[in-house]
Image (tube, rainbow, N blue to C red):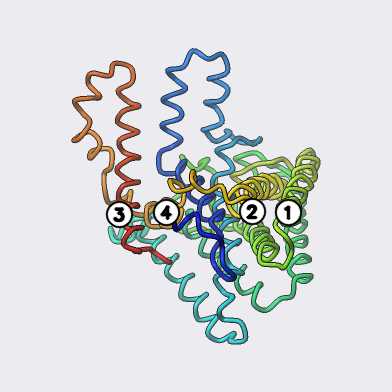
Amino acid sequence: MVEEIRKPVKEGQRLISIDALRGFDMFWIIGGDALAIRLLSLSDWKYAGRLKEQFEHVAWEGFRFYDLIFPLFLFLLGCVIPFSLEKFHGNPTQAVGRVLKRTGMLLLLALLYNDVLQFQFSTMRYAGVLQRLAICYGVCSLLYLFVPLRGRILAAVAILLGYWAMMVWIPVPGGVAGDLSPAGNLSGYIDRTYLPGRILKDYYGFGDNEGILSTIPAIVTGLLGVFAGEWLRSQRGPAEKCFGMAAAGVVLLVVGTIWGQFFPVIKNLWTSSFVLVAGGYSLLLLSLFYAVLDWMQWRWWAWFWVVIGSNAILIYMIREVIDFTKISKYFLGGIASWSGPWQGVVIQAGSLAAMWLLLYWLYRRKIFLRA
């Protein structure tokens, strides 16, 4: 398997950097964050507390490392669209069929993840991560297929400006225009009024952080990934591709930070400034992974991440079915009991190891969930 990763990338082949970066991203979702927090909690390093905060979402306004995890995944979903739809060039009917099929599959998985089989429809959460991925994938794919590059760029700009205008100029009933507080913002009001099911307190309580209105600017996050995918598929040299993405990332960070002074960076609302800041960091990370893995081809270290990234949706789903913490305690409970304050670290590391070994077994047998 290591030998396969080291092979040069052929024309039309998926880039190792994309799968590895997706795996790096998913690692934090499936428990890497909890492991980091446990390790930092045991550390006497004077900066451990501040670093620990980076593995938790900011309460409302601002940006931390953990706030990048979901937009990075959505960005990478958009990034593979030019690669996955390449083989349907000249056959739009088949391409649209594939897009609709994949969108429908993601929506089905989303409902399963949200316990639709329990038939508690009045209290079920209808929004969510997979729902947003499905919608953004479908819209971005159709835009890629039928709208030229300039039109897609204009659409992205129009969406970001239009969302900004709606959020700062349209007041909610009984409220004032421009109120971006958790209780007073327009996006939360629309969720409370029109989103079926329940609004969970864990998702800021006054609206859903993957709700109706905030999904619109999330489409631009996917489109930024599409632009990056097209750039990587171009005939440019690897150095130009790498530095081009890095330069674009810096520009987005600067513009997003400046815009954030007027339209704050708020992940729960997926504000336009948040789109640009998250997109900037995503481009910088992709340029780094591309430079190391696909340009310089230093791939020996990527194996761990590629195994996770190749089946990211599957491991996201299967955690709801298999209790990996229980598996870890079964095999490592004795060692953990002798570990003193490191007991939680041992169990969490064992849970991650169990997930990775399952993914490795599937990878070796070329079993992938291509939703």
Q: CA distance from mark 4 to mark 3?
A: 33 Å
- Crowdedness of circle 4 by 10 Å Cα count: few (<14), some, many (20+)? many
* In the depicted structure, whether residue 370 falls above or below residue 254: below
Q: Is residue 171 visible?
A: no
Mark earlier in primary sequence (3, 1): 1
Tag 3–tag 1 contact (CB < 8 Å):
no
- Residue 227 percent location from the top left of the image: 69, 62
Is residue 97 toward the left or the right of residue 367 in the image? right
Q: What's under tag 2, amino acid-wise?
A: Trp
Task: Find disc 4 in the rendering and name its residue.
Answer: 125
Mark earlier in primary sequence (4, 1): 4
* In the depicted structure, whether residue 179 falls above or below residue 216: above
Mark earlier in primary sequence (4, 3): 4
Q: Residue at x 72, y 40 (%)?
A: 264
Is residue 357 toward the left or the right of residue 70 in the image? left
Task: Find disc 1 in the rendering and name its residue.
Answer: 239
What is the quadrant of residue 254 in the picture? top right
Mark earlier in primary sequence (2, 4): 4
- Please, what secondary structure does the residue beneath circle 1 have? helix
**Quarter of the image that includes the N terminus:** bottom left
- Residue 46 percent location from the top left of the image: 56, 13
Task: Find disc 2 in the rendering and name its residue.
Answer: 295
Q: CA distance from mark 2 to mark 3?
A: 29 Å
- Residue 195 percent location from the top left of the image: 51, 58
Is residue 73 toward the left or the right of residue 329 in the image? right
Q: Which mark is residue 361?
A: 3
